[in-house]
Image (cartoon, helix red, strand yellow):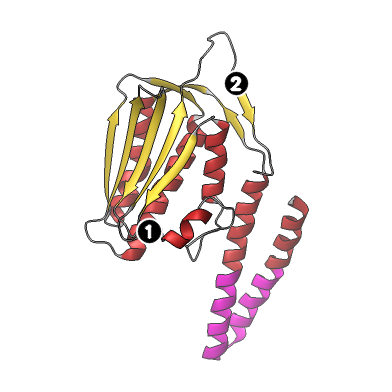
Amino acid sequence: AASINHEIGNAITPIKTLAGLIKDKNQDSQIDEFLQVINKELEKLENLLKGLKQFSKKIVIEMEQVELDSFIRRIDLLMAKEMERVGVKFVIEKSVDRLTWIMDPLKIQQVILNLLRNSVDSLVLSEKTEAQVVLKIQFQREKACLRIEITDNGPGIPGDKQADVFEAFFTTKTRGTGLGLAICQQIIKLHSGQIYFESEDAQGCRFVIDLPRREWYSDSSKPKIFGDSSHG
């Protein structure tokens, strides 16, 4: 996979260079329009290659004790302004005061940000009025798990698309690679957790993550869990 990525990447560079040279020397508006299409398609291909590179890597989970209040504040700092800029209200509901959880904070942050940004993209594309995304994090005592929910009031996921949501390369975005949710699912599986969603047409969408409680041994180094690079 790495060698194929490398070869395709090498082919893209001269095409972009030649397209740029043609644009500099060209005065024909129709040819200029064609060149814009070529550059957009090359950009899609470059994004796909970046996604493939990440997807083909073996995921390594590094467990540590995470103070959840600080973890949530970091998510808020990363996303609040981003949502404000596009007119989406961001609400955080939490009941994890002074609670710590054993997980890989960077990988779980990656999953949450991916889901939040998917919600924002969906809301912006649908031009939803009073757009809102809610991040809810709570300890589920009966299941002994940490539940993370991301809910939006956007258009939802069409029924005929729902079975494919976690499949690699499936996307409803014009610029997406379709690898984000497949990687998210693999990260949650490596935490021995679950990820699923509930959605109806025009009724918004809710993604749910359940992370089980783990034991921590203070005299040990960070436990590592290695995923399969095939993501099967």
Tell me the tag on residue 3: none
Above or below, comparing residue 74 to residue 113 in the picture:
above
List x then y, in percent, for residue 208: 40, 40
Q: Which residue is mark 2?
A: 223
Q: Residue at x 65, y 50 (%)?
A: 53
Q: Which region of the structure is painted magenta?
A: 14-41
Based on the picture, tell me whether residue 108 belongs to the magenta stretch.
Answer: no
Give the quadrant of the C terminus: top right
Q: Which residue is mark 1?
A: 122
Task: Provide the major secondary structure of the magenta segment.
Answer: helix
Q: Report the label total.
A: 2
CA distance separating discs 1 and 2: 36 Å
Hey, what amino acid is under mark 1?
A: Ser
The residue nearer to you, when weighing 18 against 42, is 42
Above or below, comparing residue 43 to residue 156 in the picture:
below
List x then y, in percent, for residue 68: 37, 26
Q: Residue at x 36, y 57 (%)?
A: 156
Task: Assign a secondary structure to mark 1.
Answer: helix
Q: Residue at x 33, y 60 (%)?
A: 155
List x then y, in percent, for residue 99: 36, 20
